[in-house]
Amino acid sequence: MSKDKEKDKEGKKFCIYLWPESSGMPKKVWKFRFSVSLFLFILGIGTVVFIACGIIITDYTRLQLSDAYNSFVLSKSDYERYSLEKNRNQIAKKLKSLENVLLQEKNYQASLDKKFDTLQKIIKKASNMGLISGIKKDPDKSASVLQNKQLLGVGGPEFECSDSAREALRMLGSDCAYDEKKDLSTVSYNAESIQVLEQFDDLLSQLEILPFLLPVYGRISSYYGVRKSPFSGSPRMHHGLDFALPYGSEVFSTAGGRIVSVKRHSIYGLMVDVEHTGGIRTRYAHLSKSLVNVGQTVESGQIIAKVGSSGRSTGPHLHYEVHINGKSINPKKLIQLGRDLGRLVNV
């Protein structure tokens, strides 16, 4: 019985033999013997260790992936925040730029309104002086052209249309029948608007051809009006402006026109008369030389003569007169109006 038990015990053990590789018989052989229970124990421990390592590796990998994803999301958030901040700065710059543009537009509009008002005053002055034809009788009415800044107009008679067109318009709450009363009022309004615009253009065109320029670059030595005569000493009416400047200085036409007179006069000496539109005539006297002929057309600012001391004169100077329909006016007022207009075009 004891031998059978020993065989059973020996039958529950494993033997492992190890020997080195050789062509002949090995000199030494290693023998390992262990029981089945020990093998199962070692196998169980190994299985547990393998499973634990797998769990640890899986968790570690998952943590790494999670960290990488979080880093990606964080980087994306930072980029989006940077983009939003950049866009916000760009929008702020654009808003600032728009504010500046609006401010410039506002200032420009204010400047235009100011210039518009100045032009209105010039128109009134010019009309009161009779410089602009056709409005001297009622300058305020003509000046009102400048006050009407919004000229809106519609027009054209409305005729009978086809049945299909009538039905389509009726669905839209309208009709295409001719309304004589409505049409007449509309035409009247349009005609008035067009007339105002035409009058405004006419005013501007007349202002452009008025003698606003200085005839010479010199100092005014005697003004328009009553003065003490340098010859008799008694009060005398002086119908122009005297400009003192060196002999032979250039004399300019103060506006475009036509030469109507080049002659010598006992008082004016050598003189040139230029006829402009609207019954306006300018005279340049006491000249030393004329550079134009009768019938010649001259432009504004063109050199027409040289300063002298011919006729009744105390020294080299230019005597300058402006006449409207044969009546003299103060040239200084025209020169001042020209300066006012010059300020309007200088932005």
Image (spheres, rainbow, N blue to C red):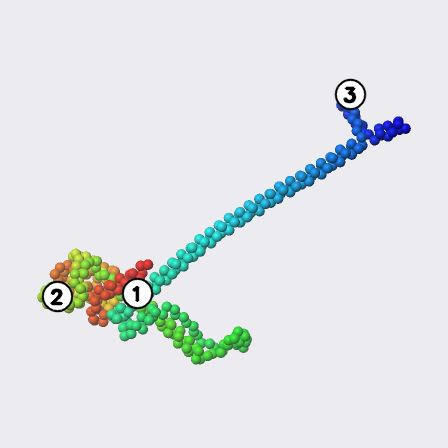
C-alpha separation, residue under disc 2 versus residue under disc 3:
157 Å
**Residue in the foreground of this view, choosing between 79 and 54:** 54
Q: Secondary structure at mark 2?
A: strand
Name the residue that disc number 3 marks: 28
Quarter of the image that includes the N terminus: top right
Q: Which residue carries the number 2 mark?
A: 228
Residue 77, given in percent of the width and then of the height, sits at 55, 48
Q: Residue at x 34, y 61 (%)?
A: 111
Q: Nearer the viewer, mark 1 or mark 2?
A: 1
Task: Find the residue positioned furthest to the left.
Answer: 232
Labels 3 and 1: the sequence-earlier one:
3
Graded by Cα atoms within 10 Å as few (under 14), some (14 to 19) or many (20 or more), the crowding at tag 1 reads some
Which residue was labeled with disc 1? 118
- Three-letter amino acid code at the position of disc 1: Thr
Foreground disc of the pair 2, 3: 3
Question: Judging from the image, what secondary structure is the residue with disc 1 in?
Answer: helix
Mark 1 → mark 2, Cα distance in angstroms: 36 Å
Query: What residue do we see at 43% from left, 57% from top?
Result: 98
Please state the total of marks drawn on the protein image.
Answer: 3
